[in-house]
Image: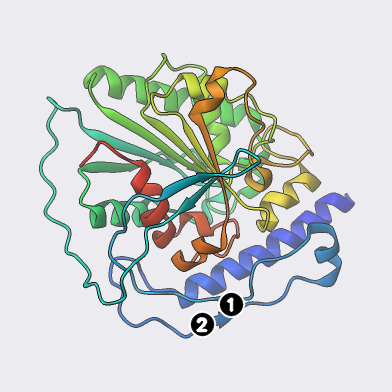
Amino acid sequence: MLRLAKFSLIMALLVLRFYADRAAAQPASSPTTSPAPKSLPPVPAALAGILGPSNPATITVRSSPPLPAAPQEATTATGSVVLKPASRSPAAAPQQAEPLAAPSKTVGRGVVFVLDGSGRIRLMTDDLQAAVAHAGLSLEVREFDWSHGVGRVFADLRNRWHHDAQGAQLAATLVAERKDDPQARLYVVAHSAGAAVVLAAVDRLPPKTLQRIILLAPAVSAGVDLRPALKATRQGVDVFYSSFDLIARGLSLTGTTDGSTAASAGATGFSSPTDDSSAALRQYPYTSEMAATGHRGGHYGWTKYGFLRDYVVPLLDGAR
């Protein structure tokens, strides 16, 4: 009960922060004048001792710069990959995306399936669609709604039967899409508890059904076996995680989607497979350079337009 009370307090604080940020932010599709930076309430001292450092207290919402080149990768001593976005010239004028050409089945259409986190608190489909359009990619962005409903955070987080049932439905959708167009480029982008549904789906997929899986702050335990996911993809799995994510860290109090009270992958990344498939697993810790996108290391920053534009869309390659 004490753990549940602590986590409920954490969730309440983080949801209040999220809605304060969203109220100050402008829609990604029509950036005009950036609002003044908004100070966020500090994390209570009692929680700071449990969870460690919190996010920086200031969030600045910026207008969208031109799309940079694909992020450059550098491997750290621990095996994690650090993404470094290409530098931007302040004088460069924003570039207008060219009209999208109609997808051709001869080269395979591109479809990105989006799975949001528990409770549908922050939806990223519209922001990802805007980022894809900004890049001039001929990709269809399609939401896969697996949730129990708005605000039903704990039902979505802990109902493992529901994860499995929705995973079976997602797998059937992907197989049907592949059957309709054998050359289709299929991607999956999942945030938080949405990762549990994806991992339930991959066990049911033929090898190399997907191009790539991208997991943002996955709310599953770090020890989950990713080999089925790696087998189901052609280009592997990309994972973004943050030690500053209070929600991801708080899952050690109430349990991850798979019921573990160990560290969640959203806070620490996954344990790498011991076989050759580990080369197809790429993990990116949060870095200070990502703050330029409006992401300050928290749970929902991964789903914002700026981060999706600069770090996720460049991973959707081969679809121009």
Circle 2: is it few (<14), some (14-19), or many (20+) Cα within 10 Å?
some
x and y, in percent, of residue 302 in the image: 50, 54
Q: CA distance from mark 2 to mark 1?
A: 6 Å
Q: Which residue is mark 2?
A: 37
x and y, in percent, of residue 154 in the image: 67, 46
Circle 1: is it few (<14), some (14-19), or many (20+) Cα within 10 Å?
few
Q: Residue furthest right?
A: 2
Find numbered disc 2 in the image and state the secondary structure of the residue it sits on: loop
Q: Nearer the viewer, residue 10 or 153?
A: 10
The mark nearer the N terminus, 2 or 1, is 2
Q: Amino acid at mark 2?
A: Pro
**Point 47% across, 85% down: residue:** 36
149 to 295, vertically: above or below: above
x and y, in percent, of residue 273 in the image: 62, 24
Find numbered disc 1 in the image and state the secondary structure of the residue it sits on: strand
Q: Quadrant of the C terminus?
A: top left
Q: Amino acid at mark 1?
A: Thr
**Point 12% across, 32% down: residue:** 104
- Asked if marks 2 and 1 touch (Cβ < 8 Å), the reply is yes
Task: Mark yes or no: residue 165 visible.
Answer: no
**Point 65% across, 56% down: residue:** 245
Q: Residue 144 lies in what quarter of the image?
A: top left
x and y, in percent, of residue 249 in the image: 72, 51
Identify the disc placed on residue 58.
1
Q: Nearer the viewer, residue 191 or 172?
A: 191
Q: Residue 278 lies in what quarter of the image?
A: top right
